[in-house]
Image (spheres, rainbow, N blue to C red):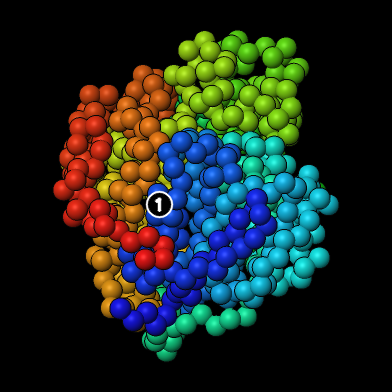
Amino acid sequence: MKMVGGYMLKALRVNLSKLKALIQGVSERFAVEFIGGRGWGAKILYDEVESWVHPFSPENKIVVAGGPLSGLTIPCSGKTNFSTISPLTNLYGDSNAGGKFSCELKKSGFDALIIEGSAEKPVILVVDDGRVSFKDASTLWGMPSLDAEKALKEELGDDFQTAVIGPAGENLVKYAAITCGGRQAARCGVGAVMGSKRLKAIAVRGDKPIPEAEPESLKEMFREAVRWIINHPAFNLWKRQGTMQSVNWANEVSCLPTRNFQEATFEDFMKINGDSMEASTRLRNKGCHLCPIRCGQVNRVGDVVVEGPEYETAAMLGSNCALSSVEDLVYANYLCDQYGLDTISTGNTIAFAMECFERGYLTKTETDGIKLRFGSVEALNEMIRRIAYRKGFGAILAEGVRVASVKIGHSSERFSMHVKGLEISGYDVRAAPAMALAYATADIGAHHNRAWAITYDLKVGRETYGEDKVRWVIYLQHIRPMFDCLGVCRFPWVELDLDPNYYAKFYTYATGLKTSLEQLLARSEKIWNLTRLINLRRGLRAEEDWLPARVFEDPIPSGPLKGLTLNREAFTQMLKKYYELRGWDERGIPTRAKLEELGLLDAPSLTS
C-alpha cells in the first residue's frame, strides 16, 4: 500500500519515569484500519494496557492524537483526541478538544503522542519541530489552567499550542479536564491521568509540511463545503450563539435537565439562554482551525473573560443547579475552566448533592457549613473550589456521583445520574427512548457525543420503542465517532447539514486512497467493538448498560410531557435488539463471528 498523504506515519512515545522519548514509525495498515484520533488511541490501549492496570498507575497511558484530516485544508479540522483508562469509570475513556493542537502536533512531525510512566517531579513536555525536551514545571504546578496556559506561552512563545491541567488534575479529581487553547477536553477524567503522571503541560510547535495527495482537489472541496456552510439558514445564529441557542429548544421539548433531572423544563430558562448571553455577557466568537462557523462564544463578567458557556454547561451548571442568571453561569464556567474541571460532571455531581441536602440526607455539618440548596450561587461556586482542591466535602464529590451516592447512602443511588460511572450529560431521556439507549450503551458512559439520538425521538414519536430507533442509535455510534477519528468537528454535518460523503472525499484527496463513507463507517464499527472488548476485559457487565432508577420510576412532573417515564420492559427489549443487531450475545459480548467479520482477530499493532 502506498501512503501518500494525510499521515506523518510517526508516533512519539514518551516515558515520563525515565524522561526519555522514542520516535516510532507507524505502519500504513495500522494507520488506515484505525483511521486516527480515538481509533488509534483505542487500539494502542487495547494492545499495551493490561486489564489490571489502575488508571493512576504509571502503566496507564494517554494517547494524544489528531486524525488524517487534522491541519489540512478542510473545514473545522483541528480536533485533538485524548484516550486513556478513565479513573471515573475504570473503563476505556476519551475526550477531545477543538482548537489547533493536533495541527501543530502533526507539523512537529507526529500523528500521536503515547505518554506512559510517571515523572518524579512535575514536568512540561515540549515538542518543538520534532525535538523533544522536558522542562521543570515547579513554577506552574498549582497554577490554574488558564493562567498556566498563558504563562507557558509567554515563556515558550505564542506560536506553541498547549495542553495543560489545573489544580483539579493535580489533585486527581476523577473528572478533571485538559485545557487546550481555552477549550477543554473534559470528559472521563483525562486531566486527572495527566496529574497522576505529574505532567503539568504539553507544548507543541512545528514547521513541517503535512503531505496531501491531491492538494488542489482538497482546496476545491474546501471551497464547496464552506459555501454550503455559510449559506445555511442557521449559520448566522451559530456564529452569534453557538450551542447556547439549544437552551430554548431543550426547554421547549422537555429534555432540559433541571434540579438534578427531577424536572425536564426550567422556569428561568430565558435567563440562561443564548439570547440573554448575547444581550449581557458576549464579547465575540472564536473558532478552531479553518472553521467558518466559529461557534465558540467568548464572554465577560466583571474582570473575568472565558470561552463559554456552551449548551452542556448551561444545562448542567445552569438549569440542573437552578441558576437563574447568565452572569452567574458564565462565572461558574470560568471557575471550572480555571480549576480544570468538566462542567458536565461538576454540574451533575453538585446538583445531586443539592438534592441530597434538600431531602435531609446531608446536613451543614457534613457539607462544611455550606447550604447546598438549588439556586444558590454561593454554594455552587464554593463547592467547585472545594472539589478542585479536594477540601472537606469536596473530596467526596471529587470522586464522581457514583461513588458519592454510595458514601452518602439513604438510597440516593436511585437518583445518582450516571451510566458506568460517567455523569449523564444535558438531556433528560424519560420521554426519549432512542437517546436513553444511546446513553445506556455508550462505550465511555453516558455522553451525548456518541449518539445524539433525541432528534430521532422527536421525529418518530417520544413513546415508541421500535427497532428503527435501535438501528438509528447504532448508525450514530458509527458516524459520530468517525469524526473524532478523522480529527474534524462534526458540527458542519450534524448542525448545518453538510453531506457526510464530503469526508470520504476529503480522506481520499488527503491520503490518495480512494475511500467511501461506507468504508469509513465500517472502520468506525470496528473501533466501537474494540472499545467494547477493552471494557469487557476490565470487568464490564451487561447490567451496566443501563440507566438510573429515576428515569424509570419518577414521572416528568410538569409541562407537555407530564407523567411520562421510560418504560422498563420496552427498554429492556430495545437493549436485547441492540445486542442482536450488533452481533453480540445476550451478555453484550461480541461473537467470534462478529470479530472475524470486522477483522479484529488479526488486526495490526502500531508498528506492524
Considering only vertical position in the picture, is 278 above or below 227?
above
Is residue 211 in view from this perspective? yes
> Would residue 111 appear left or right of 108 to someone viewing this image?
left
Residue sitting at the far front: 18
SS category of the residue bearing label 1: helix
Task: Residue at 42%, 89% (x, y): give it.
Answer: 216
- Toward the viewer: 580 or 12? 12
- The residue drawn where x is 40% and y is 25% is 548
Between 474 and 226, the residue placed more toward the observer is 474
Q: Quadrant of the C terminus?
A: bottom left
Residue 566 image position (x, y, % from top left)? 31, 27
Percent across and percent down for residue 378 are 74, 29
Question: Does residue 498 appear anywhere in the picture?
Answer: no
Q: What residue is pinned by disc 1? A: 47
Instruction: Name the one closer to the observer, 142 or 21.
Output: 21
Residue 86 spot, x, y in % from top left: 51, 41
Quadrant position of the N terminus in the picture = bottom left
Give the image quarter of residue 269: top right
Identify the residue at horizontal 74%, vertical 27% (top origin).
Answer: 391
Image position of 293 with respect to 360: above or below: below
Q: Is residue 51 left or right of residue 194?
A: left
* Mark 1: amino acid: Asp
Within 10 Å of disc 1 (Cα), the crowding (few <14, some 14-19, many 20+) is few
Q: Residue at x 26, y 36 (%)?
A: 588
